DNA sequence: GTTATTGCAAAGGCTTTGCATTACG
DNA sequence: CGTAATGCAAAGCCTTTGCAATAAC
């Protein structure tokens, strides 16, 4: 909506080699304007506010594309529906087991020690820490802890 | 097949209130005789050695039952198919992003620090650490690191 | 005009459900 | 008998794919 923001988003897609079509911009507005955690279906619903009639297949295609180019991360959290995280920097997660809600935890808050010992020469790809809790929804929805 | 082991397994099911039918015992033999990581389909295949003709629906029902009673854990790892972990004690995981292979990491090897600070009063359910790596399969398959 | 993108509908995996049949106390 | 467990087939999610129509250079 905001043209300044729209231009920044467009730039961000272009920077990683993604052609910024109207459909992809709709998805970008939903996901990339702020750090959020959403399922594909939620993204579709929200993106249709920007691009009515946007098709499910196109959203799935955009999500895969964004993930592949490092704009999003697919969280290894639940099982049923994939959750997309638009915070591109490394961090961990709180997960409300009752509501499915997710919140970011900055790296500084939670340190994993002993990695070298556990790896023993294996090539590290990444570390995911998911802290499962009750009652996250009683706190600021979708906010970063800290 | 060992009758001593069979009796121990039967006891373990009974102890948590699960009626040890032949079908459930077949699943128990596959999963609960040693710490393993398997998908439902792998369990079905293996369990049919003990109980030919065992149905898929029955295996899924048994898996849900075992999880519900704490004999198994469903791993929040990644991908399409759920992975069941028969190691009942708390621990973390190595995950081979290429093969889908999983290995246990004992708690002593990998410590998570700062939990209190991240929780800030939330009720903790559990912590999952998944270390994603390349090349795990070149090591002992399905073994515990240590 | 060629290549990329979209969108619909269909298909694909994984899992659950409905319901009749069978086993069990 | 009445309750629980099984098994088949069908249905249910979530996601991907095939393919024709459309848009972009």
Image (cartoon, coloured by chain):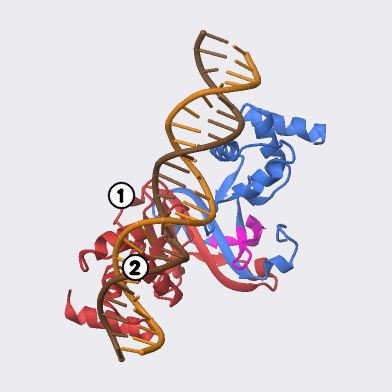
Chain colours: A red, B blue, C orange, D brown
Nearer-the-camera pick, A23 or B29: A23
Characterize the local packing of mark 1: few (<14), some (14-19) or many (20 or more) Cα atoms within 10 angstroms.
Answer: few
Task: Determine the image quadrant of residue A35.
Answer: bottom left
In percent of width and height, residue A25 lies at 27, 75
Residue B133 position, x and y percent, is 61, 69
Q: Which mark is residue A58?
A: 2
The answer to whether A8 appears left or right of D16 in the picture is left
Q: Nearer the viewer, residue B83 or B15?
A: B83
Tag of residue A138? 1
Name which residue lies at 66% across and 66% down: A118
The chain letter under disc 2 is: A
Quadrant in which the N terminus of chain A is drawn: bottom left
Q: Give B141 or A24, whichever is nearer the viewer.
A: A24
Where does the image place residue B32, in percent across and percent down from the top left?
69, 41
- Residue A13, quarter of the rendered image: bottom left
User: Do the residues bearing badges 2 and 1 touch, measured as CB atoms within 8 Å?
Assistant: no
Residue found at x 36% / y 60%: A40
User: How many C-alpha atoms fall within 10 Å of the one at disc 2: few (<14), some, or many (≥20)?
Assistant: some
Helix, strand or loop under label 2: helix
* Residue B17 in view (yes/no): no
- Based on the picture, tell me whether residue A25 belongs to the magenta stretch: no
Q: Which residues are magenta?
A: B93-112
CA–CA distance in space, label 2 to label 1:
34 Å
> What is the chain letter for disc 1?
A
- Report the quarter where the C terminus of chain A lies: bottom left
């Amino acid at each position: 909506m905001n043209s300044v923001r729209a231009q920044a988003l467009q730039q961000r897609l272009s920077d990683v080699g993604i052609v910024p079509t109207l459909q992809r911009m709709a998805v970008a507005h939903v996901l990339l304007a702020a750090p959020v955690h959403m399922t594909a279906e939620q993204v579709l619903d929200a993106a249709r506010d920007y691009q009515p009639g946007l098709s499910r297949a196109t959203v799935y295609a955009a999500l895969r594309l964004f993930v592949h180019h490092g704009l999003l991360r697919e969280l290894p959290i639940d099982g049923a529906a994939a959750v997309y995280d638009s915070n591109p920097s490394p961090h961990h997660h709180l997960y409300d087991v009752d509501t499915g809600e997710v919140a970011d935890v900055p790296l500084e808050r939670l340190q994993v020690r002993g990695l070298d010992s556990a790896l023993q020469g294996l090539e590290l790809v990444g570390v995911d820490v998911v802290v499962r809790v009750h009652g996250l929804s009683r706190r600021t929805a979708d906010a970063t802890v800290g």
